[in-house]
Amino acid sequence: MDILTTIKDHLAEILDIEAEEITLETYLVRDLGVESIDFLELAVAFNSSLGIEIEDDEIFLANLRLYLKEAKEGKSDIVSYLAQKYPSLAKERLKQILQDLDDGPVLKVKDLVSYVSFRCQEG
Amino acid sequence: MKLSFSGHQALILGGSCDLATCLARSMVQSELFPVLTFRSKQGSERISAQMASFSGKYKALYFDLAQPESIDSLFSEINDDVDFLVDFAQGDMEALIGSVNIEEMERYFSQNVSSRARVLRKTARLFLRKKRGRLIFISSTAAQRANPGQGFYAAAKSASEALYRNLGLELADRGITTVTLRAGYIDSGRGRDFIQVNKEDVLSKVPISRPITCDEVAETVLFFLSESSRGFNATEIVMDGGLVAGK
């Protein structure tokens, strides 16, 4: 089973929704109403079914606003700084995230796919 | 009353103390399988001696809060198969706030609070997979009644109680619940030694005029692990014969 299907299945089970409703572009919080306890369950489910250790803060971008503040205070290039913190996300995606911040939580299903793929490649 | 349990295997942290082995024997009699942890050779030997007539009906494994990473190997050894956690683990520390050794204090909180949080994180994630689990923390009336020299012990117990309370609050709707049992003077281990030296003074403060017995604690913990106690969650129960109710 591919990573996207696995992630969609877990989201569908935990949130009690249809997997067909979920796409790569679906926002977890904005569209699906995912809450902190759901994130914890997702991390446990990914760990169990995919056999990788999940860093909750990293996969769910939990510290994103803290890192933005750190980058600004340190006068660092924001995208480069975030790329260090979120090595699974491409710079193009990080730029999209920065443009999207004002509209609410930015995490999308494709970010979970990127993280899981990255961790699987790391072994 | 016949107690029923939604699970079989119970991990008992701090498993070499008298209370823990007493509980383990009661568990075996209730057809549960206790896994007792020890942190020293003496602890391992104490468990063997106390559980001698229950060969094959329990397991004893190494775990030390001072080495929190040992929680991973502990869970590996039991194949992540745990239904209940009973936490007796607690280091002792007696010092006045104004005279404590700073390094000793930091080490104490690291072991007895941070390491315990690490254990709870691991256990919570395991229980989330099963969508059920029950955790019992054995605290002390010292957490609520101050005594000179017991500030650090009380602070660690209070902080740990808060962790258990929050866990029960956060995960109750996922089937994971917690209870803290605050025990008063117990006729076992360090408590027994203290009571023997200060018998008159101690018993005059306890309305039932006697310490709590190991069997009473074991029966109470078993009840709190059972289905009959499902209504108790994220709370602290005091078992002290009325000690802290009075002035």
Image (spheres, rainbow, N blue to C red):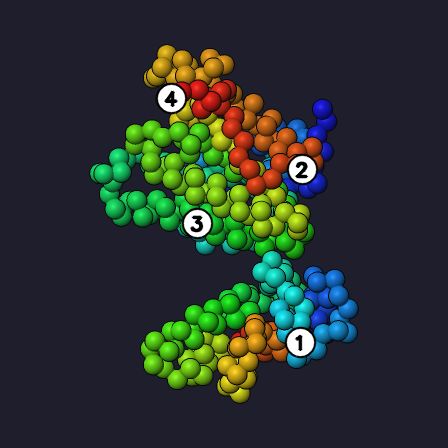
Q: CA distance from mark 1 to mark 4?
A: 63 Å
Name the residue that disc number 4 marks: B193
Q: Amino acid at mark 3?
A: Ser
Question: In the image, which disc is placed on residue B230?
Answer: 2
| Quarter of the image where one finds residue B141 | top left
Chain letter of disc 4? Answer: B
Q: CA distance from mark 1 to mark 3?
A: 37 Å
Front disc: 1 or 4:
1
- Quadrant of the image for the C terminus of chain B? top left
SS category of the residue bearing label 1: loop
In the rendered image, residue A59, in percent from the top left (x then y), is placed at: 55, 70
Q: Are marks 2 and 4 on the same chain?
A: yes
Name the residue that disc number 3 marks: B115
Q: Amino acid at mark 1?
A: Thr
Front disc: 2 or 3:
2
Name the residue that disc number 1 marks: A26
Q: Are marks 1 and 3 on the same chain?
A: no
